[in-house]
Image: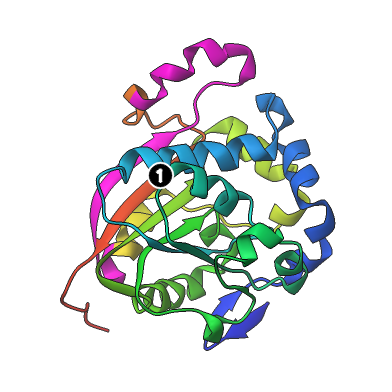
Amino acid sequence: MIVNKGIPFKAEFDAFASGYQDLVTESVRISGESSDYFAAYKARYLGRILERASVRYVLDYGCGVGSLAKHLHAQLPLERIDGYDPSADSIRRVEDCLRRQGIYSNSLQALGTSYDLIVLANVLHHVKPEGRQALLRNIICRLRPNGRLVVFEHNPYNPLTRWAVSRCVFDEDAVLLRRSETQHRLRAAGFDILRRDFIVFFPRFLAALRPMEALLDWCPMGAQYVLHGIKISASPSR
């Protein structure tokens, strides 16, 4: 565990950076898909819900090797994507094409403070519960007025999700969050919740049913859930 300006966040991912995507693919093999499929899935989801939003300046917080950022460029008309990850080895593996248009760093001090959107993709379950609120307070300070936060997290009520997490070497001490906990934490940090969706329902052998997934966002059996919040003008009491 490292501490960046009081924000606890794991740095043990250095040990897994070289084979990160292969490790994720192995842990989710029951789905029949690779880690890249899920990164592209998240990017398409963001492209759909943010199609009419004014989003140009984005931070991928917990960016790893840049898998999500690479796909986001294909889904949204962005001017810039920055990335933060405490794993220096992961940052070194970010592709040059991403580095040419944004800052990728393991130092929070290198990042901006007026993002239109910050994405937390499967990050919070790697943060100890006592550090989660501090991380969210740090994030809201990096958003412009009316800036947005989108949080993707594993759904602890989905048995296949729990199985995949149990098989992932870098999820050994992960503490999954119920959607209600994540929603409460976002509101306490100063966000108004715009959307609460469940996502990822059908494995590859049922791929023909995937066009229906957008209609199932209410169903609590999705493998993951998403919360989309907007920064409210008044800061919450601390």
Is 202 magenta? The answer is yes
Q: Which residues are magenta?
A: 187-214
Spot occupied by residue 232 in the image (x, y as percentages of width and height): 19, 68
What type is the residue that disc 1 sits on?
A: Leu
Residue situated furthest left in the rendering: 234
* Residue visible at 63% across and 19% down in the picture: 204
Q: Is residue 39 above or below residue 102?
A: above
Spot occupied by residue 7 in the image (x, y as percentages of width and height): 52, 81
Which sits in the foreground, 160 or 52?
Answer: 52
* Residue visible at 55% across and 45% down in the picture: 71
Q: Is residue 188 left or right of residue 107?
A: left
Which sits in the foreground, 147 or 170?
Answer: 147
Spot occupied by residue 212 in the image (x, y as percentages of width and height): 39, 17
Tell me the residue that label 1 is attached to.
Answer: 46
Which sits in the foreground, 207 or 1?
Answer: 207
Residue at disc 1, secondary structure: helix
Q: Is residue 107 above or below residue 27?
A: below
Label 1 CA crowd tier, 10 Å (few <14, some 14–19, many 20+): some
* Residue visible at 42% across and 55% down in the picture: 78
